[in-house]
C-alpha cells in the first residue's frame, strides 16, 4: 500500500508496523466528506481505487458523511435535507464506480454525534483546550477558505474534524494532502494529552491538478477545471482537449508546494490524470497515438520527447476517462432508486 505513487504516508514506518500488527485482525481507516454538490473524478474514480487498495491490505474503511460540516461551511444553502440527498448521491456514485463495499461503513455525522454526544463533545472540548486559536485558524484552509472572514462555526470545523479521528477510532487518516494540517493537529493533540494509544497514522493521497494552468487542485466552482462523474462523452472530450498540457516547465505558472507529495516541475494535468487515474487500476495500460503504454513514466517520456503528440495524448486520455465514467452514467440511467 506504500509502494505505489498514491497514497503517501506521513508516517510510513508506523504504517508498516500497523500492517504487521493487524495482519490478522485488520485496521480502520477514515475519510470524511462534505456532501456539497457534484462529484469530480478525483473524489469518484480516484477515491474508489484508493479505498479498494486499502481494503486489499486488510483495512476497514469508514466514511464520515459530514453533513453538519457542510452546514458549517455554508454548502447547499445550509439546507440539511438537500445535503443529505447529495450525500446519498455520492454513495451511489462510488458504488457505480467500482468501490468495494464489503468492508466500507458510511456514518452520518449528525446521526452519530446526536446518538453518542456524551462521547463526542467532551473529546472535542479537550482538543479545543489544548489547541491555540492561531493553530486552529491555520487549519481552516481544509475547508477551502482563507484565514480571514471566518464565521464562529467555521472555527469549530477543524476542532470537530480532529475529534472525528478519535470518535471513529481510526488507526489511519486517509484523506487528501490538503487535509494534512488538521491530521497533524490530531497527532500533536495526542502528544499534548499524553495519549500513548490511538495516535493516528496519516496516509495522504495526491490532489489531482485542475485542468487549467496553475490549478494545484480541481475546483467544483469552476466546471471546466475538472471532469465530473456525470459528464457526457462530449463534455469529457471538450474539457480534455482544452486542458493545459506543457512539454516543458513554465516558470510563470504558480506552484503550491503544500499540495505536492512529490516533485513535479511540469504540472501537466493530462499526464497527472494518466498517472493517478488511468494507471491507478491494477494491470492498466494506456493507448494513444497508435501505441500502448505499460506505465505512466513511459507516457511522459514519449510526450516530453516528442514521440507522442499533444492531440494523441489528449484523445487517448479522453477515451480512457470516458470508459471509467460509462458505468456511472449507466447506473443512474438504469437504476430507478439511484436516479
Image: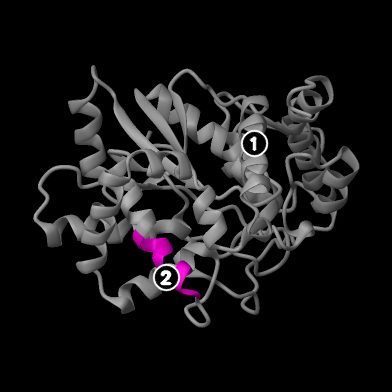
* Helix, strand or loop for the magenta stretch, by majority: helix
Image quadrant for the N terminus? Answer: top left
* Magenta run includes residue 158: yes
Q: Secondary structure at mark 1?
A: helix
- In the picture shown, does residue 48 fall above or below 317? above
Horizontal side of residue 20 vs 178, given as left or right: left
- Residue 204 rendering spot, x and y as whole percentages: 41, 49
Q: Identify the mark at residue 35; answer none if there is no mark.
A: none
User: Is residue 213 among what the camera can see?
Assistant: yes
Q: Nearer the viewer, residue 310 or 59?
A: 59
Q: Secondary structure at mark 2?
A: helix
- Residue 169 rendering spot, x and y as whole percentages: 28, 38
Q: Residue at x 28, y 23 (%)?
A: 26
3D distance between C-alphas at marks 1 and 2: 38 Å
Q: Residue at x 70, y 61 (%)?
A: 247
Q: Nearer the viewer, residue 115 or 237?
A: 115
Residue range corresponding to the magenta coloring: 151-159
Q: Which residue is mark 1?
A: 278
Residue count near mark 2 (Cα–Cα under 10 Å), binned few <14, some 14–19, many ≥20: some
- In the picture shown, does residue 109 fall above or below 181? above
- Residue 208 rendering spot, x and y as whole percentages: 59, 52
Contact check, label 1 and label 2, Cβ < 8 Å: no
Q: Which residue is mark 2?
A: 155
Amino acid at each position: 500500500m506504500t509502494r505505489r505513487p498514491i497514497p503517501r504516508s506521513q508516517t510510513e514506518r508506523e504504517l508498516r508496523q500497523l500492517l504487521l500488527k493487524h495482519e490478522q485482525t485488520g485496521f480502520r481507516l477514515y475519510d470524511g466528506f462534505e456532501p456539497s454538490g457534484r462529484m469530480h473524478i478525483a473524489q469518484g474514480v480516484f477515491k474508489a481505487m484508493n479505498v479498494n487498495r486499502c481494503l486489499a491490505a486488510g483495512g476497514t474503511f469508514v466514511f464520515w458523511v459530514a453533513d453538519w460540516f457542510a452546514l458549517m461551511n455554508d454548502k447547499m444553502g445550509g439546507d440539511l435535507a438537500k445535503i443529505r440527498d447529495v450525500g446519498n448521491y455520492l454513495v451511489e456514485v462510488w458504488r457505480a464506480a467500482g468501490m468495494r463495499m464489503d468492508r466500507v461503513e458510511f456514518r452520518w455525522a449528525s446521526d452519530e454525534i446526536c446518538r453518542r454526544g456524551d462521547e463526542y463533545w467532551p473529546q472535542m472540548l479537550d482538543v479545543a483546550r489544548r489547541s491555540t486559536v492561531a493553530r486552529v485558524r491555520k487549519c481552516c484552509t481544509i475547508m477551502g477558505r482563507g484565514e480571514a472572514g471566518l464565521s464562529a462555526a467555521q472555527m469549530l470545523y477543524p476542532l470537530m474534524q480532529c475529534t472525528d479521528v478519535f470518535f471513529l477510532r481510526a488507526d489511519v487518516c486517509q484523506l487528501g494532502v490538503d487535509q494534512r494540517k488538521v491530521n497533524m493537529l490530531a497527532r500533536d493533540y495526542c502528544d499534548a494529552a499524553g495519549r500513548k494509544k490511538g495516535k493516528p497514522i496519516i496516509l495522504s493521497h495526491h490532489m489531482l491538478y485542475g485542468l487549467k494552468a496553475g490549478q494545484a487542485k480541481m475546483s467544483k466552482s469552476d466546471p471546466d477545471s475538472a471532469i465530473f462523474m456525470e459528464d457526457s462523452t462530449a463534455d469529457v472530450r471538450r474539457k480534455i482537449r482544452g486542458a493545459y498540457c506543457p512539454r516543458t516547465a513554465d516558470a510563470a505558472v504558480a506552484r503550491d508546494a503544500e499540495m505536492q507529495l512529490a516533485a513535479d516541475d511540469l504540472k501537466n494535468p493530462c499526464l497527472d490524470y494518466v498517472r493517478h487515474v488511468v494507471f491507478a487500476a491494477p494491470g492498466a495500460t494506456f493507448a494513444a497515438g497508435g501505441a500502448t503504454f505499460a506505465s505512466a513514466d513511459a507516457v511522459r517520456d514519449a510526450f516530453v520527447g516528442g514521440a507522442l503528440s499533444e492531440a494523441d495524448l489528449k484523445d487517448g486520455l479522453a477515451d480512457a476517462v470516458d470508459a471509467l465514467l460509462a458505468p456511472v452514467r449507466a447506473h443512474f440511467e438504469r437504476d430507478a432508486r439511484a436516479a
